[in-house]
Image (cartoon, rainbow, N blue to C red):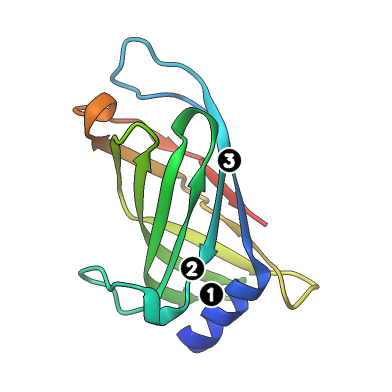
Amino acid sequence: MKPKTLGKFFALSGTAMCLGAAPGLADNPHCRQIGGGVLTNFLDPSECLLTAGSSVNLCTDGTATDDLRGAVGVQVLQVTGTATGLILHNQHHWVTESGDTIFLNPADATAYATPDNNRFLGDYLSGIEITGGTGAFEGRRAPSLPLVRSI
C-alpha cells in the first residue's frame, strides 16, 4: 500500500490510543502507577516534517490526558508489511502540560486489518521506552512500557 493511501486510510479510521496503567520512572525511588489516554490524528502528509532517517511522510499530532498530560506527536520513520499486518517504525515526541519533554526510543506499532475497511487495530507489542527528558524527567529512565493500544 502506498504511504499516501495508507495515510488516508488512517486519517479516515481515526486513532484512539489508551495509555494503560504502567510503572512510573524506574530510576525514581518514588515509582508510581500512571494512567491516562492519548488521542492522535494522522496529518495530511504535506504537513509532516521529515525526521532524520524517515523515508515515510506520515505523522500524527494529539493530546495526552491524566498523569502525563500534554502534547504527543509521532513521526512514522518506516512502514513494512508482514503476513499479519503492517509494522510502523515510529519516533514519538512528547511535551507535558508543565513544559517538560519526555524522550522516547523509536518503537514499532503493528497494525492489523479488521472486518471494517475503515478501521484497524494497532498495538506496540514491545511497548514504548522512556529514556529521559527535561524537568521532572531529567536523568530518568523507565522500562519498556506497554503504553499504547490503538483502535
Q: Which residue lies furthest to the top in this view?
A: 29
Q: Looking at the image, is mark 3 or mark 2 nearer the viewer? A: 3
Q: Which residue is drawn at 54% across and 30% down?
A: 66
Q: Nearer the viewer, residue 101 or 88?
A: 101
Q: Which residue is drawn at 23% across and 28% down?
A: 135
Marked residue nearer the N-terminal end (3 or 1) = 3
Tell me if residue 140 can be seen: no
**Looking at the picture, does residue 20 appear above or below residue 117?**
above
Residue beneath disc 3: 37
Q: Which amino acid does label 3 sit on?
A: Gly
Q: How crowded is mark 1: few (under 14 residues within 10 Å), some or many (20 or more)?
A: few
Mark 2 residue element: strand
Q: Which amino acid does label 2 sit on?
A: Ile
The numbered dot on residue 82 is 1
Q: Are marks 1 and 2 in contact (CB under 8 Å)?
A: yes
The numbered dot on residue 87 is 2
Residue 125: x %, y % from top left? 52, 51
Distance between the alpha carbons at the discs numbered 3 and 1: 28 Å
Q: Which residue is drawn at 56% across and 29% down?
A: 35
Q: Residues within 10 Å of mark 2 (few under 14, many from 20)?
A: many
Q: Residue at x 27, y 38 (%)?
A: 131
